[in-house]
Image: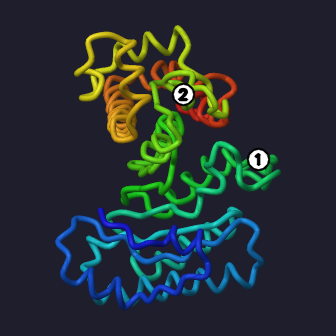
Amino acid sequence: MVDSGGFTLLSRRHLKFDVSVVERIYRNLEADILVSLDNPPLPDDDLRTKKRLLGETLKNLKRLLDSAAAHRLMPVVHGHTLDELRLACQRVHELIPEPKQIGLGGLVPLLCSGGLVAGFTYRRLDGSPGDRSDFVADAIVIVKRHFPKSMLHVFGVGSTTTAISVLALGADSVDSLAWRRIASFGAILLPGTSERFPRQRQGRTRSRPVLNDSDLILLEACLCPVCRAQSNVLSRQKNLDSCYKRRAVHNAWTLLREVDRLRAALLDKRVEEFVRSRLNSHHRFFRPVSRMLAETQP
């Protein structure tokens, strides 16, 4: 899958990006999936700006359909209210009624653990008030209803627990830069935990917890290429603490292995057991995932 740079446009509004560049590249690129150039809105954009960005996203999609086969092209929909998302789905459906894959983008401000959008609320499908995690869950439902035969990809999910949550809620695939971003902060990922510093380091801001005894047991069981090369857990701590590349490899491995475990649990009908072993009651997706699991019980 090759992305087109839509998130860059979201985070750097001053950039001017011509769809003709993407068009020229896509004509000659041998990739399985080509993401249409989308222009995601921000949750606090006014209605006029959101309308303009939706128009640009649809215009780009229509143009790229002339450059890439429809079965290779991934349209992307956005919205920060259910009506906005429904409209985006309807407009994409007019251009590609049944895409092989559909992307759900523009959610990074809602998915970030710190919550870049303070006090985000909306009305859920059943009319009750919802928060940003509820919105992600409802957004997945809406997109899947509009495109029931399409593979659903959710962009920019972040951590391992968020990735597992979004997949459990119905997404078919996700992408994440968290493994690399977390490594650059000096931290690592472990199954079912938040980001951790491998060791206490003098002068470093305690923005994340340091590995505790329970975390060390998880680290000792890690089979990533970096950890396998170390004979004991103390060596693993030191090795990960001292090198960005090692942390990045470890984090990428952890993320991919957790997704593999979730997929195995889905096949074995153990998804509830697995998800509950990874999400504690304080995780922002605990409530929507628990609600989804309860609704799907026979």
Residue 93 location in percent, x, y?
46, 75
Q: Which residue is mark 2?
A: 196
80 lies above or below 290: below
Task: Depth check: give the residue in front, 108 or 286.
Answer: 108
User: In what element is the residue under mark 2?
Assistant: loop
Residue 87, disc: none
Asked whether residue 169 is in view, the answer is no
Instruction: Determine the residue positioned at 63% across, 36% down.
Output: 285
Left or right: residue 226 versus residue 97 is left
Residue type beneath disc 1: Gly
Instruction: Determine the residue positioned at 49% across, 72% down.
Output: 6
239 lies above or below 292: above
Residue type beneath disc 2: Arg
Gap between marks 2 and 1 measured at Cα: 30 Å
Asked whether residue 291 is in view, the answer is yes
Disc on the earlier residue, 2 or 1 = 1
User: In what element is the residue under mark 1?
Assistant: strand
Left or right: residue 280 versus residue 156 is right
Task: Depth check: give the residue in front, 104 or 214.
Answer: 214
Q: Which residue is mark 1?
A: 130
Residue 39 location in percent, x, y?
54, 77
Residue 260 location in percent, x, y?
32, 32
Q: What is the crowding at mark 2: few (fewer than 14 residues within 10 Å), some, or many (at least 20)? A: many
